[in-house]
Amino acid sequence: MWIKPMTGLFAAVVCVGVIATIGIFLPSQTIQQQATENKTWHEKLVFYGTNNENRMIQIDSEIWRIEWIALPLQGRENISLFAMDVYSRPDGYLITTGSLNKGWPVADTRYIVQKGQFEVTITTANLEGWQINIYEYY
């Protein structure tokens, strides 16, 4: 099953990135200051695939993160595509985005400070696979 190799690879190559836009993202230092006593990260959801996908999620904690990784098809690295967008629902605002960069595999993390309902949209082409991990902080 594809998720087994991704789990180890995911842990080895995740690069932490933080976006500061629309006033809902905070620098990692600010998130660490808000992360107070007795709170820890809890895995909310893991999903993976090889094709496009939309997934609705409910986030109950004020702080959460989304991690992603994408692996290209061997020999098609130059024409592979991965894009991950998170929209708030029902208003449809783009909360964060992540996409393919040079150098493989591609992995990143986004920290978000907003609870509620969200839609995660994955757009792909020529990938061996991708994986999304979502964690809540409480």
Image (cartoon, grey):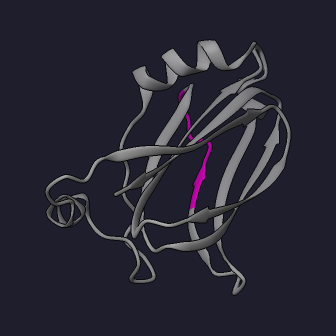
Asked if residue 17 lies in the magenta stretch, the reply is no
Residue at x-position 41% and y-position 20%? 12
Residue 21 x/y as whole percent: 42, 76
Residue at x-position 14% and y-position 64%? 33
Query: What quarter of the picture does the N terminus occupy?
Result: top right
**Count of numbered labels shown in the rendering:** 0
Asked if residue 98 lies in the magenta stretch, the reply is yes
Residue sticking out furthest to the bottom: 91
Residue 15 x/y as whole percent: 38, 37
Residue nearest the observer in this picture, 118 or 23: 118
Residue at x-position 56% and y-position 25%? 104
Residue 37 x/y as whole percent: 14, 56
What residue range appears in magenta? 97-103
130 shown above or below 32:
above
Q: Is residue 83 left or right of residue 124?
A: left
Residue at x-position 30% and y-position 70%? 26
Image quadrant in which you'd find residue 81: top right
Residue 126 x/y as whole percent: 83, 30
Image quadrant in which you'd find residue 42: top left
Residue nearest the observer in this picture, 79 or 127: 127
